[in-house]
Amino acid sequence: MLRLRFHGRGGQGAKVASRVLGSAAFLDGYNAQDFPLYGAERRGAPITAFTRISRDDIMERGLVSQPDVVVVMDETLLLDPQSSPLSGLKKGGVVFVNTPRTPFETKEGYGIEDHVITLDITKVSLDMIGQPVLSSLAAAVAAKVAGIGEKALRDALKKELSAIISEKDLLDRNIEAAIYCYNSVEPISIETTEKVREKENIISIPFETALVSSPSILSRGNTPLRRTGNWRIFRPVWDYDACTKCMTCVARCPEGCIRLNEEGYPFADYENCKGCLICAEECPVGAISKVRESHSQTKEGDQ
Amino acid sequence: MDSENIRSIKELPPEENMQPGTAACAGCGGLLTLRYCLKALGENIVIVNAAGCFTLLTIYPFSPFRNSWLYTAMACAPAGAQGVRDALDILIKKGKLDPEENLKVVVLAGDGSAYDMALSSTSGAIYRNLDFYYICYDNEAYGNTGFQHSGASPFGSRTGTTPPGEKVPVGSQLQKKNLFDIWNSHKPPYLATVSPAYPVDLMNKFKKAEQFKGPKLFISHIPCPPGWGFDPSQSVKLAKLSVETGLWPLKESIHGEVEHTFVPKKFKPVEEYLQAQERFSHLFKPERQEDALKSIQEMVDEYWRKNTLLP
């Protein structure tokens, strides 16, 4: 049996990806299971989805805690201790990471020892579909890794996506982009052992007094520590030659994370800017442009 | 706070009483409204939060607020506010709390709570003349749990529980409740509708409300990017469109007397607002549902005609 786990953010399509993969496997003659796991819904929250594929009956139920394949749709999740996409991955398993970097750079950058495959599916999605929605693309990559046939994938995409997408044109572009990703990934044979990588195992924390070990609920306004800046796909960038210091962007930011520098020009707190780009949309002189975010390049030192 | 009105966004108070890094969706119109409200209310408040999207703002151990926060079930935020108000009053009376350190009690509720579940407890609180602020962020559905139909969902909209289909191609067949009129019939000291696209108007309404003791109620119409289906960057544009088309009248009521605070010089057609959202897309394709579109426009026209602001 092949066990896969998808890690994405709310709105990216991890749930639909696992669903498309499950259907594709089924249409290719396998038994399959797929299901998501998330809390209260919201865009940007870490989401997990699971797929089990097997020639035999699948008697196993519940979450996949020891996957053979992990699909990471947002690479910033690799640094998120709450999400921990690599936990429980079996030795010899495969990790797919959505990043512009090469597999080697990704392995080095995040200290991954397992087999890594990379592809910038966000870029493919923006170029071919026009929106950063990754469900069909992640499903296609996973289908290739799992050894599912192209026809089964195509049929599954048509079946699952037509229930959500009413525009035929958009549906076609989704399928086309998915097949492109499918063909961009080299076939691979997965031979996992029953051993789980040790790095992510449960750690024990030494006893500390409550003052040290428990978070302080009395500290006020501490959400900036959550650093929601990694939700961003585009970042707003100011052109101070055009800026008239009119304060519109400062006023219109829902998060309130645009401030003024000493000269009175606005700048964003990129640690927390979610990239909604209302600022760019509302700027009366068009001084704010949107630039594709590349988290892997800014990891070492966000400017 | 001085009673002088502010005239432009440059005059908005610079203090931020809500920190970034919340779990709200990118481009959340409700968050923008809340940010303005907190600028107007200041730091010395207690927020009584009914279950809803904004439950996610304060997740242990994180809080974006500089003030205290109490979480209640969907149906009982005004009852929670009564408890907090009473506790503060008793502490002041017993001399255990300096009146200088008195706090404003603020209820924060989504439309699911305000229009449906907490309607009776809100009515009770207004009836008892409870001294509190009530802010309803109205995204026209139960946004936090998958955008299901609420008492605020408008006619013709697609929600999680009113998908347009063969039998009912129009989506929701029910009209949005008129919460403003329901509340206004209680004759509260102060009641207003606000919009995140008009922060100056919003801020001045809060300033005006300050002089009244008793319930001070605000309903804000807010765009919801995932629920309504539009790009997060368009949030303010859509909030503005809902006012400019006449769908969301900006008005206030003092002891039951209603006055409009902003009347568009020329009303934009409602279609412009509807067309920009995925939740109304079924009204335009595969074929235009003329009857539905016409009845939405007529409903808006009738409102303004009735208020003699339209010929």
Image (cartoon, coloured by chain):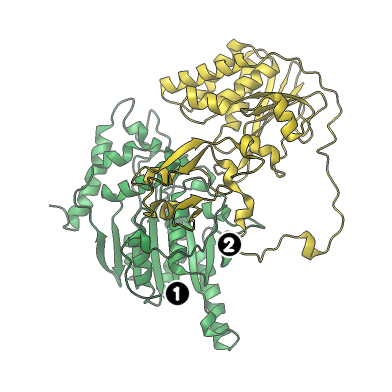
Image coordinates of residue B257 in percent, x first then y, are 26, 69
Q: Look at mark 1 in the image and give the residue it sits on.
A: B130
Instruction: Tell me which numbered mark, 2 or 1, is placed earlier along the sequence.
Output: 2
Determine the secondary structure under disc 2: strand
- In the rendered view, tell whether residue A172 sits above or below residue A296: above
* Numbered circles on residues, count: 2
What subunit carries mark 1? B
Image coordinates of residue A5 in percent, x first then y, are 70, 30
**Which chain wears green?**
B
- In the rendered view, tell whether residue B92 sits above or below residue B108: below
Question: Would residue B308 appear left or right of A236 to someone viewing this image?
Answer: left
Between A72 and A273, the residue placed more toward the observer is: A273
Question: Would residue A173 appear left or right of A215 to someone viewing this image?
Answer: left
2 and 1 marks on the same chain = yes
Q: Determine which quarter of the picture holds residue A37.
A: top right
Quadrant for the N terminus of chain B in the image? bottom left
Mark 2 and mark 1: Cα distance apart in space: 19 Å
Image point (24%, 43%), residue name: B297
What subunit carries mark 2? B
Q: Which amino acid lies under the numbered mark 1 shown in the image of this protein?
A: Leu
Determine the secondary structure under disc 1: loop
Answer few, some or many: residues within 10 Å of disc 2's Cα (few below 14, many 20 plus, some between 14 and 19).
some
Q: Kindly identify which numbered label has been placed on residue A84.
A: none
Q: Which amino acid lies under the numbered mark 2 shown in the image of this protein?
A: Tyr
Image coordinates of residue A257 in percent, x first then y, are 51, 53
Answer few, some or many: residues within 10 Å of disc 1's Cα (few below 14, many 20 plus, some between 14 and 19).
many
Is residue A62 in view from this perspective? no
**Which chain wears yellow?**
A
Between B197 and A100, the residue placed more toward the observer is: A100
Q: Look at mark 2 in the image and give the residue it sits on.
A: B71
Is residue B184 in view from this perspective? yes
